[in-house]
Amino acid sequence: MQTALRTSLPETELASRANFAPHARVVREERPAQTIGLPLSISGLRKSFGDNEVLRGIDLHIPAGQFVAIVGKSGCGKSTLLRLIAGLDKIDSGSISFGDEVRTEDIRVMFQEPRLLPWARVLSNVEVGLGRDRASKDAHARAEKALTEVGLADKRDQWPSVLSGGQKQRVALGRALVSRPRVLAFDEPLGALDALTRISMQRLLERVWRDQGFTAILVTHDVAEAVALADRVLVIDEGRIAHDVVVNTARPRERGSAELAALEGSILSHLLSADDRT
Ligand SMILES: Nc1ncnc2c1ncn2[C@@H]1O[C@H](COP(=O)(O)OP(=O)(O)O)[C@@H](O)[C@H]1O
Ligand SMILES: [Mg+2]
């Protein structure tokens, strides 16, 4: 079902075609192989900073294309785990493997701060995400496409300084998407946004994930956001995965539904019981 949903069609068109199996089949066959997410296996992963044992044995398998959220109290090692997955820091022991050989462009991270280059216009900021391919002939076209995907095609010639906080994060998302990553990791990407902008960004994240099929790993402190977006929520506590909660709720999800609220409540109680011990 999820494979069928991850097409390049806009949501409305997808809904209107939902009953036409032949269309669905054609669309699936047209999907370029490189847009498909990578699976991720982590085994016995440990990481310390001096005496501070942050990750004490993480074992985890994420199937290709899954949307996983990671929650846990501040300082429990969420960002550390993400940095290790993205290859931004070295593991002490254990292993992290993707079911395939990975290029740097295959794995991207988006942070809470948009980290845009102030001296470069919006389109150039997106092109930065192409890495080595930035010099290629289709760099402009690819960046324009990514900007369109995040709804900012009309801002291509603007300077970052004139954009709102939400727009800057959209540019950062465009920069992350432009290389067609196979794994996209988000470290509290919406934490600095106001409530309404946050909800519209959550919808955008879900849409691009569905359209492109990358494996998504979202660190968030917002449990409601985790259950709204993810297939699965991991709770990290004392350096390990303390809870692994499946979110089966069908998409599109109704925010504030009783089902999601119940899941959110149960995950929050795990987090609070972890907090009581400290
Ligand atoms: N580069 C570093 N050097 C030393 N300590 C670090 C470093 N990065 C993270 N830590 C420590 O590791 C722990 C986990 O940090 P972090 O992964 O950022 O937590 P979280 O993202 O869950 O809030 C914290 O105690 C933090 O101080
Ligand atoms: Mg963090």
Image: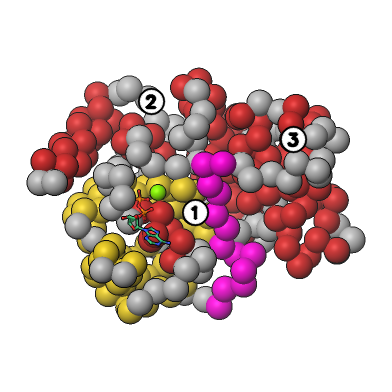
Q: Is residue 112 magenta?
A: yes
Task: Give the mark count.
Answer: 3
Above or below, 175 relative to 159: below
Q: Which residue is mark 1?
A: 185
Q: Is 98 situated left or right of 119 in this image? A: left
Residue 9 shows up from this direction: no
* Residue that appears at 74% across and 31% down: 161
The mark closer to the camera, 1 or 3, is 3
Secondary-structure class at tag 2: loop
Amino acid type of disc 2?
A: Glu
Q: Earlier in the sequence, mark 1 or mark 3?
A: 3
Q: Is mark 1 within 8 Å of ligand 2?
A: no
Secondary-structure class at tag 3: helix
Q: How is the image coloured?
A: secondary structure
Label 2 to label 3, Cα distance in Å?
33 Å
* Residue that appears at 81% across and 44% down: 120
Image mark for residue 254: 2
* Quarter-of-image position of residue 28: bottom right
Label 1 to label 3, Cα distance in Å?
23 Å
Q: Which percent across, then down, holds residue 234?
A: 28, 51
Q: Which percent across, then down, holds residue 148?
A: 74, 38
The foreground one among 55 and 242 is 55
Q: Is residue 197 magenta?
A: no
Q: Which residues are magenta?
A: 101-113
Q: Dot 1: within a 10 Å radius of its alpha carbon, few (fewer than 14), some, or many (20 or more) residues?
A: many
Above or below, 43 relative to 219: below
Amino acid type of disc 1?
A: Ala
Q: Which residue is mark 3?
A: 160
Q: Dot 2: within a 10 Å radius of its alpha carbon, few (fewer than 14), some, or many (20 or more) residues?
A: few
